[in-house]
Amino acid sequence: MKRIIRIILEIVKINFFALFKIKTNSLSVKEFPLDIYGKSAFFNHPFYKKGETSYFAQIYGSNNSLDFVVAKRSHLKFVSEIVKGTYVNCVHKLHIKEGELLPVSIPNKNTDASTASIRINSNGKDYELKKLKQNSFHFIPFTKESNVEVSSNREIIVGDPIRFINSSSNKPNKKLVMSIFIDGLSSEIFKNEKIEKLMPNVAKYFSEGSMFFNVISSGNWTLPGVGSLFSGLYPIKHGMNHPRKELEIGKDYKIISEYFKESGYTTAQICSNFRKSPGYGYMKGFDRTLYKNGMNCKESIFNTIEHLRSFSKTSNYVWLTLFDLHDFLDGVPDLSVQTDLSIDLHNYGVDSSKSVFHSYDSNRIDRYLSELKRIDFYLKFLFDYISNNYQDEEIVLSICSDHGQSYLTDEEEILSRGRVIVPMFFKSEEAPFLTNNELVSNVDYLPSILNLSKINFEHDSIDGELPTIFGGKNGREYAISESIYPDQPYKAVIHKHNEFFYVNSTNNISNIDNIDIEKLELKLEKCLISDDGSIQYTKPDKDDLSKCIDMLIKR
């Protein structure tokens, strides 16, 4: 009875806030497809509009979804399929090029039953499509250039055409470019166990490629870290820092998906991470996005393979997010992980602090290792599919990450090396076969993948630099990690080749959107790195602090 009352009260509360457009603290950008007012993107058409650009979300791969939904929060359990398009009243005319798909959906707030119909006229020929499932996109293929009229007896969503067959005038340099983003993958874990043991399939696949293990993330958690991967900018510039504010990626700068879209690729994203949800604008530049907070790696990888099968005749850029290292996405570990754990490791009692503040925990490490092996197992299906369907000269494949894990080491610093040093792998005909410890930042990911894909970009518009093995001239002198968090001290680490510096403010940051480094009260710690990797604290030189401040201002 208490549960029923709670659900009813929540329904009334969310619908009340949505009706009067009042923000509620119980909802945030993380709750997509719900927005901060309680509206569902499935029925808010469009859920994002800027100028002439509109994005629409519909339900993917779920039958009779709405018929069994009581509370709006249940929408979080559905996979959202997102395309750019137009909301039209009954009739829409457009020109479609040879080899394009036309996404069409018939929205209905009451049911998603397969009772809808639409009519399509293509170059004078009529088609009536009946018994269409509502609230889901249907992709209609056109193998010939066509003048098309789509009509219905009610409002419909007509998506922008998506290329699924390359034309003679549209042949990008590669057939497949893919970013595999593994949230929370730390280089620290490979110090005691070789990657060949922990992730044998990843190690084998990227052994014929470039593997970096000394990549400095720009931040120690997802929001700033993945923002740098997408933009090639440090967090202070891309602005994705505040954990509670409404933020938008790519607001006044170009992001990775837009580079590939402008270069003629069909772009897609399969994402499971609430810190890069469409609520933050992460659908921008993608022809098609599948998103569900907590989509597990098995579902994510097979959704990716399904997409590649469907678009096998065109050139694809795909961003795949794997979120499984962060938490148990289904409440408990996958069965293969549970059977791999000893009895004591089934005790999940931990403190309730944010993951970035967790301290060393051997039990968590063991579960992390087991989850890592599970991800590697499923990635083999993806690698095998790609190997069987693409030539090496046709692809650029990569693995990247946003931060390490605080519980992997006993270092107390919030920007310790275990928390900010991550791996970055590339497989491409243009990528040398080697394991590299060159000093690299995660802001270098964007220029690296663009360079390997032979896409031009303005070097001066980003902070990223090309590693020397990809043609960079001098290599990095230093790389910066920062903690820009509200109501906490400003922290930064400047990493150099054989030393690094901790920069800490003695006062808290009141406005993280406008930090004046010169006005902060800063103190400095200096650490030397020996040949065996051990760290020794030492007294800073007289001018070290001023040099560090200059580096922070310069970036």
Image (cartoon, grey):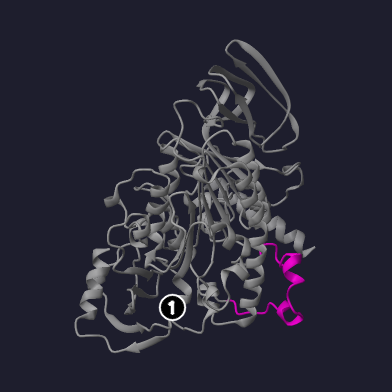
Residue 53 appears in the figure = yes
Q: Which residue is mark 1?
A: 416
In the displayed structure, 483 sits above or below 15; it is: below
x, y percent for residue 123: 57, 12
Residue 354 appears in the figure = no
x, y percent for residue 238: 37, 56
In the displayed structure, 429 sits above or below 414; it is: above
Q: Which residues are magenta?
A: 328-352
Q: How many marks?
A: 1
How packed is label 1: few (under 14 Cα within 10 Å), some, or many (20 or more)? Answer: some
> Residue shown at 67%/35% (left/top)?
108
Kind of residue at badge 1 = Ser
If the image is split into quadrants, where does the N terminus sit? Answer: bottom right
Indicate whether residue 380 is drawn in magenta. no
x, y percent for residue 340: 74, 73
In the displayed structure, 535 sits above or below 546; it is: below
If the image is split into quadrants, where does the C terminus sit? Answer: bottom left
> Residue shown at 62%/67% (left/top)?
372
Depth check, front residue: 5 or 392:
392
Farthest residue in the right direction?
1
